[in-house]
Image (cartoon, helix red, strand yellow):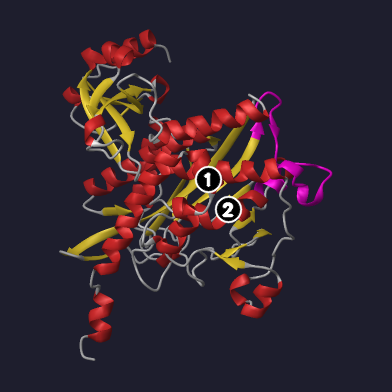
Amino acid sequence: MTKNNLINVVKKEKISFISLQFITIGGEIKNVITPSRDLGEVLDKGCSFDGSSAGFVPVDKSDLILLPDPNSFCILPWGEEENRTARLICDVAGNDNKELDTDPRFTLKRVIKEMQDEFGHSWNFSLAPELEFYLLIKKGEKDYEPSDQAGYFSIPPKDLGDEFRKKLSRILDSLGIISQKNHHEVPKGKHEINFHYGNALEVADNTITYKQVVKYYASKEGLIATFMPKPFFGTYGTGMHIHLNLVDSSKGENLFYSKEEKYNLSEIGRHFLAGLLHHAKALAGITNPSVNSYKRLVPGWEAPVYISWGLFNRSALLRIPATSPENRRVEIRSPDASSNPYLAFAAILVAGLDGIRQKLELPPPINENIYAMSPEEKAKKGIKSLPGNLKEALESLEKDDVIIKSLGEELINKFLSLKWKEWEEFSVRVHPWELEKYLDV
């Protein structure tokens, strides 16, 4: 969308304000609101802000600029009519108007461009995340419970979220986030709405908007929507499984598909999967970046623990879903929505491309239930485990020179500093389990 087209749409739709949104290194959505009358100037010059308060730069270099992406324009469906607001997602730049190396959105754009410069300008990284969430009722200051007692694919009246999900689907469609199937998940109060496959940057933008929409409309219903990886002990967590492949847009060709080769998986696809397995432990530090992430990654709750791949196998880290061969793709099952989608998608792409560059060999698939295997059986098949906690994941990330170099040392150092602080805070806190376990000892 050109500048003039955008200004004309804003006038036609009687937009009063523009929400200039960006995402922090830690994955938090931020915004500054400007009157729509200033849109032309903002598109030309950007909008200045204090980048140190958002964690991008030190205080002595705090003057940064938000550069709106006109293609991210959408009209927000909430708020008073006289305050009608549209959203533009921004890249973060220095005061020289050059995009900032520590901006997650710019990092994803750069990694995609580097792929295209190396392998072909028609190559695209396409994906679709499955964003699960719980709807909760607050019962006390720190007491929450699921909003219904329904189970997998339940129907009303047991599924109390049925109408809410339909409402969200319509709203997401109005924002250009084309919803697909939605349903109640296995545990009480857990839901899922899928949206359309697309290029990585577009899908990352859609992911942050999706989370904002779900949380906003849940609050309007007197509910709390959470994407927390493991809000309750003894039941299923919430993941962000990601379906992905590489596409040659000039030919309309799925680069993971081969009619002749085994599993209908091309050489490019096999190397890409091998790269994901090779970098799996370091990837966890970015795709599962919270202390709580590792309460989900435990055996028995359909969350991946073991570094492996398989056909249709939900106990494996990487799964080839049962689809038509032409739609051949891989599902990486470890990520969760506490991750920054721009960094998660960029790191996944970096790992896969490294597999292609190095021509890494893909091991044989594991098509048995890995959870049921003995330690000896897993050792015999060479199946290793993902990190068991955030500390192990961050240590693995610190050792992965490929991911660090590709995403940028400055960005990764800031990310690691943020996450090590979280780990230290967790480590010194006294938790309810400790009181229950040790108080009377």
Disc 1 packing (10 Å; few <14; some 14–19; many ≥20): many
Q: Residue furthest bottom?
A: 441
Q: Count residues near mark 2 (Cα–Cα under 10 Å), then give few for <14, some for 14-19, many for 20+.
A: many
Q: Nearer the viewer, residue 150 or 61?
A: 61
| Residue extent of the magenta highlight | 247-273
Q: Could you tell me residue 53's position as x and y percent?
A: 22, 38
Q: Secondary structure at mark 2?
A: loop
Q: Is residue 221 magenta?
A: no
The quarter holding residue 310 reads: bottom right
Instruction: Give how far across and how far down residue 153 sits, in percent.
Output: 48, 59
Q: Is residue 176 above or below residue 394?
A: above
Q: Which residue is mark 2?
A: 279
Q: Where does the C terminus fall, quadrant-wise? A: bottom left
User: Which quadrant would residue 318 be assigned to in this image?
Assistant: bottom right
Q: Is residue 403 above or below residue 60?
A: below
Q: Residue at x 27, y 43 (%)?
A: 216
Q: On the image, numbered disc 1 is attached to which residue?
A: 403
Judge from the rendering whether residue 285 lies leftward or rightward of residue 135; answer left or right: right
Q: CA distance from mark 1 to mark 2?
A: 8 Å
Direction right: furthest residue: 260
Q: Are marks 1 and 2 in contact (CB under 8 Å)?
A: yes
Which of marks 2 and 1 precedes in the sequence?
Answer: 2
271 in the magenta segment: yes
| Residue 110 point in image, percent of width and height | 50, 30
